[in-house]
Amino acid sequence: MVDSSEEPRAVASRLTGRPVTGGRPLSGALAEVTLDGGTVVVVVKRGDGPRAVRAEVAGLRWLAAAGAVRMPAVHGHDEQWMVTERIPTGPPGAGSAARFGRALAALHSAGAPAFGAPPPDGPEDAYIGLAPMRNSTGADWPRWYAEHRVLPYLRRAVDDGTLRCAEAAAVERVCERLPGLAGPAEPPARLHGDLWNGNVLWGADGHVHLIDPAAHGGHRETDLAMLHLFGCPHLDRILAGYQEAAPLADGWADRVGLHQLFPLLVHTVLFGRGYAEQALRVARRALAG
């Protein structure tokens, strides 16, 4: 049986098999631990259960396997804890942003078996942040996106009383019209899945590293829409690098809101009415356009 109250330094030693010389807390779930007399520093993270740990570890490894965007190496894990490489950070830079854009395009191009496909060894019932996320697969993106990414969180928001039924109808109409709004069909991309600025680390090595994935097969515009939603330094340079490597289909900028419905409704479920109002504005613009 795994002890979730185990001290992070003991976890790091147990999971890596290496001596520990120091450590400090970073947050409630994170700690930084020093191994081998100060030569190796790792991050110890306590997960929210076996599926959460399994999903994150599988996602980190699947994204890293593409050899595109840099991901922290996994040094060990069990059902409750994971130990990963610590990424020394530096200031955001325009050159790093352009490189990241090209690398993100390469990551997406590595593909996935289907929309909604989990990483190899990843659970079907996974998470995005603290919200459950089910990785059921589909071959048609508009139908899959509506059924498995938008409507589950819309229904939860209505059940919780955060959205009224009459308001939810606007989002439901967008889902009905998605086949005509979604743009040209594209193959499933290998997505980070939770690509907001907090999961983008500007490394001291001059490269961007990504953490905390909710990885799955999806539409590549969804990752880019999340970068737009929460902002990111040098976003224009990121997009320029991306477009240089893998140009987006015409009209992609008009579809950003469609792809933001998913994270906005997730945040509605987690954080309340303010995000519900954003989701409704996005839905009404899509219907009006």
Image (cartoon, grey):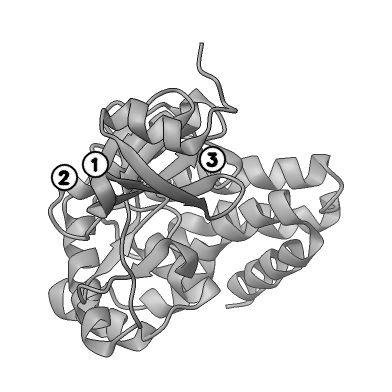
Disc 3 crowd, CA 10 A, few/some/many (<14, 14-19, 20+):
some
N-term-proximal mark, 3 vs 2: 2
N-term-proximal mark, 1 vs 3: 1
Answer with left or right where residue 188 lies relative to residue 273.
left
Q: Is residue 117 visible?
A: no
Quote the CA–CA distance across marks 1 and 3: 24 Å
In the image, what residue type sits under mark 2? Ala
Per the image, the residue denoted by label 2 is: 65
Q: Nearer the viewer, residue 65 or 225?
A: 65
Whether label 3 touches label 2, CB < 8 Å: no
Per the image, the residue denoted by label 1 is: 62
Q: Quadrant of residue 211?
A: bottom left
Quote the CA–CA distance across marks 3 and 2: 29 Å
Per the image, the residue denoted by label 3 is: 147
Q: Quadrant of residue 84?
A: top left
Helix, strand or loop status at disc 2: helix
Residue at 76% in and 47% down: 157
Label 3 or label 2, whichever lies nearer to me, is: 2
Quote the CA–CA distance across marks 1 and 2: 5 Å
